[in-house]
Amino acid sequence: EMPPVKGDVVFNDVTFGYTPKQTIFEHLSFHVKPGETIALVGPTGAGKSTVINLISRFYDVNDGEILIDGMDIRNVTLNSLRNQMGVMLQDTFIFSGTILDNIRYGKLDATEEEVMEAAKIVRAHEFIINMKDGYRTVIKERGSTLSAGQRQLISFARTLLSDPKVLILDEATSSIDTQTEIILQEGLDRLLEGRTAFIIAHRLSTIKNSSRIFYIADKKIQESGSHDEL
Ligand code: ATP
Ligand code: MG
């Protein structure tokens, strides 16, 4: 069992490849402190999603170790590890049901008030109350009746309810309008408070708001303190 963590993440001399022949990372080391927001950037195929796959232990490192709050993630149960993490992938998981239930999926015993409170904090409340039946609006599987920005806001609210200390976000690439981008950035800022986050960033606003930028290329991470240095 992994006890509740603060969100300190260490990669210590990590070497990894999906196949023995081709390594994606070699001797990769970094230390992310609780509460930091890391923007992962770099060319396609460089290994951004792989960093996320390794932290959530979808794959094990070949060499080296990954520590969360000093604990080797191989020494705790997968369930207890993933309970401390909020993973938000590009394609938000939406099931056929009400918006209320889709947000509540983050904490199944949450009351309607708690769901609304979470939605307000991440700025999802406004678009929801403007829908036909508000929180009781039934959305189709995969959320085809919602915009990409709205699906992302639902996943922010859901993740806030589940209250993970380590957040992983693969930002949607689909184009969104400026107004939605502002709302998403505000919602994301609230969600990030007090959490460690790794964001595969596609929006400049996200990169600007991160504490550090990890540029991934050539099996390594080149760190840059702020977006001005890139
Ligand atoms: P993108 O910006 O396109 O999402 P990325 O930086 O996220 O790219 P990764 O998905 O981490 O890149 O992939 C890194 C490398 O590992 C690529 O060469 C990719 O083909 C390979 N790869 C990714 N997933 C697997 C897998 N499950 N099995 C084998 N190879 C994989
Ligand atoms: Mg990727």
Image (cartoon, rainbow, N blue to C red):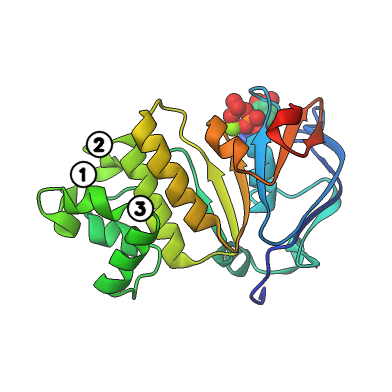
Give the amino acid at mark 1.
Answer: Lys
Tell me the CA gap for discs 2 and 1.
6 Å
Residue 222 placement (x, y as % from top left)? 81, 33
Q: On the rendered structure, is 224 left or right of 227?
A: right
Image vertical order of residue 66 relative to residue 16, above or below: below
Residue identified by numbered label 1: 140
Could you classify mark 2 by the number of other residues whose Cα lies within 10 Å: few (under 14), some (14-19), or many (20 or more)?
A: few
Instruction: State whether residue 33 appears in this view.
Output: yes
Residue 80 placement (x, y as % from top left)? 60, 70
Could you classify mark 1 by the number of other residues whose Cα lies within 10 Å: few (under 14), some (14-19), or many (20 or more)?
A: some
Residue 136 placement (x, y as % from top left)? 15, 58
**What secondary structure is found at the residue carrying circle 1?**
loop
Indicate yes or no: mark 3 CB to ligand 2 under 8 Å. Answer: no
Q: Check contact, mark 2 vs mark 1: CB within 8 A.
A: yes
Residue identified by numbered label 2: 144
Indicate yes or no: mark 2 CB to ligand 1 under 8 Å. Answer: no
Q: Check contact, mark 2 vs mark 3: CB within 8 A.
A: no
Residue identified by numbered label 3: 123
Could you classify mark 3 by the number of other residues whose Cα lies within 10 Å: few (under 14), some (14-19), or many (20 or more)?
A: many
Tell which residue pokes out farthest to the left in this image.
132
Q: Residue at x 68, y 27 (%)?
A: 42
Tell me the CA gap for discs 1 and 3.
22 Å
Q: Quadrant of the N terminus?
A: bottom right
Q: On the rendered structure, is 92 left or right of 19?
A: left
Instruction: State whether residue 92 appears in this view.
Output: no
Q: Nearer the viewer, mark 1 or mark 3?
A: 3
**What secondary structure is found at the residue carrying circle 3?**
loop
Q: Residue at x 31, y 42 (%)?
A: 150
Q: Earlier in the sequence, mark 2 or mark 3?
A: 3
Residue 108 placement (x, y as % from top left)? 35, 70
